[in-house]
Amino acid sequence: MADDLSHETSIRVTVRVRPFNSTELELFQNGFSAPRPAYASQVTANQAIRKIVHVLDDNVVVFDPPPSNDDGNVAMNRYRRALMDNTNVPVQAYRRYKDVKYAFDRVFNEDATQMDVYERTTRDLIAGILNGYNATVFAYGATGCGKTHTIR
């Protein structure tokens, strides 16, 4: 495998889409009906939480895709429930979605384990390091995006 490294570029960009944590998962599943912590209402601006990154394949992610029909029906039911419950209704009940595709050297979905990421991104670098080559692996991203989840 070390010979394969000579045919690749010196920089590889990979993305790992982390799964929802337990708090996010609860908000995602319960929508408006779940009591929200203070930070959640600020972050989501009184909107139901939803996935804004969809892994299309091993190299492409879609940012802010439109909801599937099932997701749209769930969102509409939450909206109607919020109206009937007389709670805060999202300012943008319906909006345009960006639906932008980005290509990377490798994309890992929510089901990827740390071992999957290691095997596909770092393992081959070890042989080079042992042969005197330099290598750096680092995680970059916003607070809460999953850097520690990936590296640990």
Image (cartoon, helix red, strand yellow):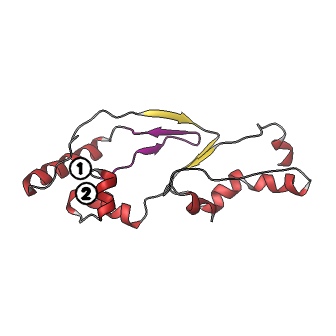
Which residue sits at x=49%, y=33%?
101
Front-lying residue, 39 or 59? 39
Which residue is pictured at 27% across the width and 52% down the height? Answer: 48
For the point 27% across and 35% down, the residue is: 95
Residue 87: x percent and y percent?
13, 56
Nearest to the observer: residue 41 or residue 12: 41
Disc 2: which residue:
31
* Disc 2, SS: helix
| Residue drawn at point x = 32 percent, y = 41 percent | 67
- Closest to the camera, between mark 2 and mark 1, is 2
Q: Which mark is residue 74?
A: 1
Amino acid type at circle 2 is Gly
Q: Check the image and report above or below for 16 versus 93.
A: below
Horizontal placement of 16 versus 46: left or right? right
Q: Is residue 52 magenta?
A: yes
Quadrant placement of the C terminus: bottom right
Tag 1: amino acid = Val
Residue 10 against residue 113 in the figure, above or below? above
| Classed neighbour count for the residue bearing mark 2: other residues with Cα under 10 Å, few (<14), some (14–19), many (≥20) | many
Circle 2/circle 1 CB separation < 8 Å: yes
Asked if the magenta segment contains residue 115, the reply would be: no
Please provide the residue range marked out in magenta: 49-65
